[in-house]
Image (spheres, rainbow, N blue to C red):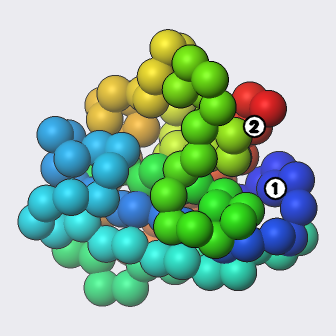
C-alpha cells in the first residue's frame, strides 16, 4: 500500500474472483483482511487458489466497518484497487483491476486515493 494519509483506523481489503461481487466482498471465493493503518502497510492473502482476481482496498479511518461518503456519494475515506485501476464516476470494472494468480507469489502495489 502506498499513499496512506494517516495511521488512523484500519486498512480493509477484499480479494475476489467474482466480477459481479467486485468491488464488494460478496460471493464464493472472496477473502477479506483488516490490518491497522500505518506508514507502511503490507497485506498478504494466504492460500489463494490459481485464478483471476481483483483487490479493492478501503482506508477505514474511523474504524466503523464501512466506506463513509459525503454529499453526492463522494468517498470521504481512501480507496485503491489492484493494477492501480482508475476510478471514473464510480469504481473500476473487474477487468481493469484483475490479475492472474498461479503457483508463484504475486505482488500488487496499490496506491490509495482520497477525494476529500
Q: Measured from the top left, where is residue 81 in percent x and y?
A: 52, 44
Q: Residue 4 carries which label?
A: 1
- The residue tagged 2 is 114
Say above or below: 99 vs 88: below
Say which quarter of the image contains residue 49. Answer: bottom left
Q: Which of marks 1 and 2 is nearer the N terminus?
A: 1
Q: The C terminus appears in which quarter of the rendering?
A: top right
Q: Which residue is drawn at 34% across and 27% down?
A: 93
Q: The N terminus appears in which quarter of the rendering?
A: bottom right
Say above or below: 61 vs 93: below
Q: Work out whether residue 41 can be spotted.
A: no
Q: Measured from the top left, where is residue 60 in percent x and y?
A: 64, 61
**Who is closer to the viewer here, 59 or 1?**
59
Q: Residue at x 13, y 60 (%)?
A: 27
Q: Residue at x 16, y 68 (%)?
A: 29
Q: How crowded is mark 1: few (under 14 residues within 10 Å), some or many (20 or more)?
A: many
Secondary structure of the residue carrying numbered label 1:
loop
As drawn, the residue found furthest toward the top would be 89
Q: Work out whether residue 96 can be spotted.
A: yes
Secondary structure of the residue carrying numbered label 2:
loop
Task: Mark 1 and mark 2 in contact? Answer it, CB < 8 Å.
Answer: no
Say above or below: 104 vs 91: below
**Who is closer to the viewer here, 5 or 62?**
62
Q: For this view, does 93 lie left or right of residue 61?
A: left
Q: Which residue is drawn at 24% across and 66% down?
A: 30
Say which quarter of the image contains residue 16. Answer: bottom left
Say above or below: 70 vs 1: above
Q: Measured from the top left, where is residue 102 in percent x and y?
A: 28, 66
Amino acid at each position: 500500500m502506498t499513499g496512506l494519509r494517516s495511521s488512523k483506523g484500519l486498512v480493509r481489503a477484499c480479494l475476489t474472483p467474482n466480477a459481479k461481487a467486485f468491488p464488494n466482498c460478496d460471493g464464493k471465493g472472496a477473502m477479506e483482511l483488516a490490518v491497522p493503518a500505518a506508514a507502511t502497510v503490507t497485506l498478504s492473502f494466504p492460500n489463494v487458489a490459481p485464478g483471476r482476481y481483483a483487490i479493492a482496498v478501503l482506508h477505514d479511518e474511523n474504524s466503523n466497518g464501512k466506506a463513509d461518503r459525503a454529499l453526492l456519494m463522494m468517498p470521504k475515506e481512501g480507496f485503491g484497487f489492484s493494477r492501480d485501476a482508475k476510478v471514473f464516476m464510480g469504481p473500476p470494472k473487474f477487468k481493469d483491476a484483475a490479475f492472474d494468480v498461479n503457483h508463484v507469489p504475486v505482488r500488487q502495489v496499490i496506491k490509495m486515493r482520497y477525494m476529500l
